[in-house]
Image (tube, rainbow, N blue to C red):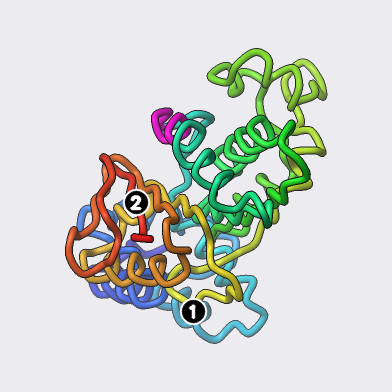
């Protein structure tokens, strides 16, 4: 099999940027080669040009889904950037309880949910907060561009050791040991999370706006223009007074997006 040429890498890079918003630097050429090499070998292809042509012509969408799964990076763990969850519990949820006590409805979108650790944690926090406060609708949306990690999120099965960052009471109440190695998310949490595949570059298909959007450690892969455009679209689907949480390694423009800066990586739409 031939090596990935600069021209081939540029074609792939331009396609990823145009369709998924992900910007790949020249240093990522080796990474792209290593992640796609096994796919070319399985398909019996000799060059990346042959593979790219096949990718564009294949009609079922399976090849493109596999390509996205290979290229995108998905790294997460339970209680990542813990202060966000503390703020969500101590500030955001009390605000929503007071502001929407009549409707008892909280709409939360966990964008780029990866394998589900973040969405599960958020759902547990909502369950804990609202469980003695009437019949609140806490069903949430969790989305990702990768079908592969969404399958893992839907399965809701995690290595038991991965739960160590969670409070012991949560481990006992919201997870059930499957065997010596794995634990399963309880139905009362899993059934309240609606997992969907969604590309942040495409039009958002929502009929109602959200009170909270979590989109953490994703926009770091976007260039400034793409990031600002996505944030403006987040703003459009955020309820007045609603919150946007991004990753601590990320930042958004203080002007032009509409959100007000609250604290590092936490923004709010004005009331």
Residue 266 x %, y %: 33, 45
In three-dimensional space, the C-alpha distance between marks 2 and 1, rounded to whole angstroms, equals 29 Å
Callout 1: 10 Å neighbours few (<14), some, many (20+)?
A: few
Quarter of the picture holding the N terminus? bottom left
Residue 239 horizontal side relative to residue 147, left or right: left
Residue 104 horizontal side relative to residue 99, left or right: right
N-term-proximal mark, 2 vs 1: 2
The magenta stretch spans residue 173: no
Q: Residue at x 27, y 55 (%)?
A: 260
Residue 98 x %, y %: 55, 45
Residue 33 x %, y %: 37, 57
What is the magenta segment's predominant secondary structure? Answer: helix
Quarter of the picture holding the C terminus? bottom left
Note whether 155 is above or below 7 in the view shown: above
Q: Which residue is mark 1?
A: 203
Q: Residue at x 60, y 56 (%)?
A: 107
Residue 130 x %, y %: 68, 36
In the foreground, 55 or 16: 16
Note whether 230 is above or below 152 in the view shown: below
Q: Residue at x 33, y 70 (%)?
A: 232
Question: Which image quadrant is residue 206 in?
Answer: bottom right
In the foreground, 196 or 49: 196
Note whether 182 is above or below 103 in the view shown: above
Choose mark 2 or mark 1, whichever is in front.
1
Residue 252 horizontal side relative to residue 15, left or right: left
Q: Which portion, as a residue range, is magenta?
A: 81-87
Mark 1 element type: loop
Mark 2 element type: helix
- Label number found at residue 31: 2
Note whether 186 is above or below 106 in the view shown: above
């Amino acid at each position: 099999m031939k090596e990935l040429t600069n021209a081939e890498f540029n074609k792939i890079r331009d396609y990823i940027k145009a369709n998924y918003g992900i910007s790949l630097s020249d240093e990522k050429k080796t990474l792209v080669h290593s992640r796609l090499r096994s796919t070319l070998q399985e398909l019996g292809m000799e060059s990346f040009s042959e593979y790219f042509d096949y990718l564009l012509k294949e009609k079922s969408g399976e090849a493109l889904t596999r390509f996205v799964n290979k290229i995108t990076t998905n790294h997460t763990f339970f209680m990542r950037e813990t202060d966000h969850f503390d703020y969500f519990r101590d500030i955001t949820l009390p605000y929503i309880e007071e502001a929407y006590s009549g409707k008892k409805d909280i709409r939360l979108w966990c964008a780029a949910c990866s394998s589900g650790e973040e969405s599960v944690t958020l759902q547990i926090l909502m369950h804990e907060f609202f469980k003695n406060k009437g019949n609140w609708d806490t069903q949430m949306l969790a989305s990702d561009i990768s079908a592969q990690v969404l399958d893992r999120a839907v399965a809701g099965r995690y290595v038991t050791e991965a739960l160590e960052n969670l409070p012991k009471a949560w481990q006992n109440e919201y997870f059930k040991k499957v065997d010596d190695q794995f634990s399963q998310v309880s139905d009362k949490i899993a059934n309240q999370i609606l997992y969907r595949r969604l590309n942040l570059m495409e039009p958002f298909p929502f009929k109602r706006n959200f009170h909270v959007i979590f989109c953490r450690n994703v926009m770091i892969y976007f260039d400034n223009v793409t990031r600002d455009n996505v944030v403006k679209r987040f703003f459009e689907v955020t309820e007045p007074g609603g919150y946007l949480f991004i990753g601590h390694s990320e930042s958004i423009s203080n002007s032009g997006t509409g959100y007000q800066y609250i604290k590092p990586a936490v923004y709010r739409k004005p009331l």
